[in-house]
Image (tube, rainbow, N blue to C red):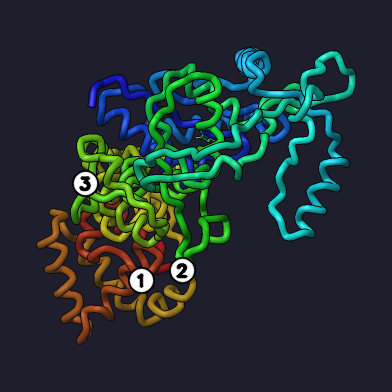
Amino acid sequence: MTNNVRVRFAPSPTGHLHIGGARTALFNYLFARHHRGTFILRIEDTDQERSTKEFLESILKGMEWLGMEWDEGPFHQFERLAVYREHVEKLLKAGKAYRCYCTPEELEVKRKALLAAGGKPKYDGKCRTGDRGLRTTERKPSCIRFKTPQEGLVEFNDICRGRIVTDRKELDDMIILRTDGTPTYNLTVVVDDVTMKITHVIRGDDHLNNTPRQIQLYEALGFAVPQFAHLPMIHGSDKKKLSKRHGAVSVVEYQEQGFLPEAMLNYLARLGWSSGDQEIFTKKELIEKFDLNAVGKSPSIFDIGKCTWVNSQHLAKLSERELVEKTKPYLKGLGLKVEDAEYAAKALHSERERGKTLKELAEISAFYFRDEVVWDEKAKAKWLDEKGKKHLKPLLEKFQALSRWNEEEIKQSFAAAQQELGIQKMLDLAQPLRTALTGTTVSPGIFEVLVILGKERVLKRLGKALV
Ligand code: GLU
């Protein structure tokens, strides 16, 4: 394919960037980058009542966080109203559109009658016939409808869905300009895709029903029809359309939960697309391997367990420096500061396998960064009782006497204390020690924790635990 590929992501700022929208954006992005084409961002904000600045900002932030940089835009439909009206005029002049004076009440009565008779609600074409629709001087409020051709079929080859055929008779005369002068979605999308020279329309298959209508508009305006790729829906684990019921759906929530953007991209790409058995991809690999023809038509399931696993795989690949930088904001969220980057690197690295997200990693590593140990009350009651404290005392003395603080020396002191105290199981000494140092009974290997914390912190924490 040549590099004239032009695709767009066209969100409406009526909500945050959600998983489905982000996946649509990503497939457009990967397709554009793979073919060295152009990725355009277009904001579909003609619905001024439901569109907000906050949602717009949130969408832009989500795109930036995921690293899907766009080449053109963001274009705002609201600023292009004159362009849409121009095209409506063109259709009116060519007799391919007409004014409709039917009142909402009138239409409602007819709609109900049709439904009651078991039919599909469809405009009956009252203003289409005769010259009624042409009397532009009439003062009554009117909207403008597209004069749908009634003969033949609309056909197109969808890259994901194959051949789609619709009988034109099934399509009624849709409104293209509302009574208040605002254009409708099917018109704006066609005018924009044409004027922005879009070559491939890649979007969710909830728009599949709109496509034959849009193709008729392309035809009426005398424009070439782009290629279409309707992406399969994303379902929750219960096979129903992904929604809030299934947990977090907006991308910002995943950021807050400490997912890595590169892991999110990886997981989103796998929702509907695959390349052999490969599960873990870098962004570069995704761009290299992405192929729209490999996208099927069956819905994919959003599985948070799998998404978390993918995240942990990407976490494992970070350098220690990156790990510190990326975990910092989450430590900050817990009120903790990184003062010594080298210490933080060792601390976080020791927990890297257990922490599946940056937030979880910050939480389980928090004990390294706190001035005062926060004790889990249950652990304290069980292991820092009189017996536990009695056992820790000689251990503390042995640690104090150490001139070198390394794993070998520490192990020797521990073994000597265990023997002197006549403790059979290592756990019976390790758990009071772990509780004293970390506040809980779960942590990386106790000797690793001791080495990382360093002598000074260990002595201070043991001293406090013994009070
Ligand atoms: N604004 C539409 C949406 O958010 C975009 C539809 C399209 O891509 O044509 O669903």
SS category of the residue bearing label 1: loop
On the image, numbered disc 1 is attached to which residue? 441
Give the class, few, some or many, for how many residues have Cα within 10 Å of label 3's Cα (few <14, many ≥20).
Answer: few
Q: Is residue 107 above or below residue 47?
A: below
SS category of the residue bearing label 2: loop
Q: Is residue 331 above or below residue 417?
A: above
150 or 226: nearer the viewer? 150
Question: Along the horizontal axis of the image, is 76 left or right of 237?
Answer: right
Q: Residue at point 81% right, 15% down?
A: 136
**Total count of labels:** 3
- Which kind of residue does numbered mark 2 sit on? Asp
Question: Along the horizontal axis of the image, is 292 left or right of 180?
Answer: left
Which label is found at residue 317? 3
Coordinates of residue 377 in the picture (x, y in percent): 49, 72
Alpha carbon of mark 1 to alpha carbon of mark 3: how far? 28 Å
Q: Residue at point 30% right, 60% down?
A: 354
Coordinates of residue 80 in the picture (x, y in percent): 61, 16
Q: Quadrant of the C terminus?
A: bottom left
Callout 1–callout 3 Cβ contact below 8 Å: no
On the image, numbered disc 2 is attached to which residue? 376
Coordinates of residue 427 in the picture (x, y in percent): 25, 79
Determine if residue 335 is in view: no
Give the class, few, some or many, for how many residues have Cα within 10 Å of label 2's Cα (few <14, many ≥20).
Answer: few
Give the class, few, some or many, for how many residues have Cα within 10 Å of label 1's Cα (few <14, many ≥20).
Answer: many
Nearer the N terminus, badge 3 or badge 2?
Answer: 3
Alpha carbon of mark 3 to alpha carbon of mark 2: how far? 32 Å
Nearer the N terminus, badge 1 or badge 2?
Answer: 2
